[in-house]
């Protein structure tokens, strides 16, 4: 079982995505998948987000609102948000990261389990940049390169039903895992499943 600290209940707030109108969280009668990524244009993050974008209709049909948080400034993130179907939120001061216990670590990139995703992510990003489909990330990303991902499934009443902090930069829920958690959500216990597995 994980030992990290995160909120058991998320208080009401309004988030301001760079690519959509402001949105209130939690969302009554819907689940929210709040995922924390690294910096705008991160090749490893983009690899994962493309898999989420491809299946966004399934995620929406399961009653899930997808929100992705980056520790990049809003103007930088906005350049990378074009065409993505989910809300992307800039948190350059990392207030949400601290609130949810999402911490940076050198193991984000040094863990051998992330290396295949780094190779794939860089290759795909370079190919897409050469075709004019993606923009290059900042040479020195705001907030650094050592962020770890985090995933939280939040009920309409604010309860955190499941949570996962990644142990490396590509350690997050897959879309299949997210959909399985959502399918179990109505029967979830009031206390959070902190493993998210």
Image (cartoon, helix red, strand yellow):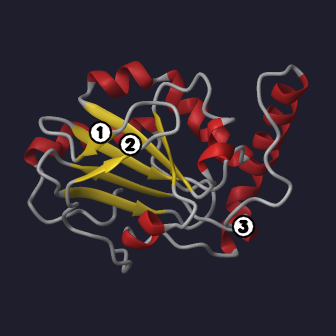
- Residue lying furthest right in this view? 130
Give the Cα separation between the discs numbered 2 and 1: 5 Å
Q: Residue at x 17, y 54 (%)?
A: 158
| Residue 17 picture location, percent across and down | 46, 40
Q: Which residue is mark 3?
A: 144
Q: Secondary structure at mark 2?
A: helix
- The residue positioned 40% from the left and 36% from the top of the image is 176
Relative to residue 23, is residue 132 depicted above or below? above
Q: Which residue is disc 1 drawn over? A: 180
Q: Identify the residue under disc 2.
A: 177
Q: Nearer the viewer, residue 78 or 182?
A: 78
For marks 1 and 3 on the same chain, the one whose residue lies earlier in the sequence: 3
Residue at figure coordinates x 39%, y 31% from the top left: 21
Counting residues from the start of the chain, the first of labels 3 and 2 encountered is: 3
Answer few, some or many: residues within 10 Å of disc 2's Cα (few below 14, many 20 plus, some between 14 and 19): few
Contact (Cβ within 8 Å) of mark 2 with mark 1: yes
Which quarter of the picture shows residue 132? top right
Is 112 positioned to the left or the right of 95 in the image?
Answer: right
């Amino acid at each position: 079982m994980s030992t990290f600290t995160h909120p058991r209940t998320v208080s009401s707030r309004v988030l301001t995505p760079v690519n959509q109108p402001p949105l209130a969280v939690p969302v009554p009668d819907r689940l929210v998948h709040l995922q924390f990524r690294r910096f705008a244009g991160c090749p490893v993050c983009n690899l994962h987000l493309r898999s989420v974008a491809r299946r966004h209709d399934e995620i929406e049909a399961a009653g899930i609102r997808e929100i992705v948080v980056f520790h990049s400034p809003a103007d930088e993130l906005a350049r990378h948000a074009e065409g993505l179907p989910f809300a992307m939120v800039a948190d350059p001061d990392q207030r949400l990261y601290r609130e949810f216990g999402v911490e940076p670590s050198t193991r984000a990139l040094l863990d051998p389990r992330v290396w295949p995703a780094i190779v794939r992510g860089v290759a795909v990003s370079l190919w897409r940049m050469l075709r004019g489909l993606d923009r290059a990330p900042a040479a020195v990303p705001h907030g650094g390169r050592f962020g770890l991902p985090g995933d939280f499934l939040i009920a309409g009443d604010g309860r955190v039903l499941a949570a996962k902090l990644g142990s490396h930069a590509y350690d997050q829920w897959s879309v299949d895992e997210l959909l399985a958690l959502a399918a179990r959500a109505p029967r979830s216990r009031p206390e959070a499943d902190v493993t998210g597995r």
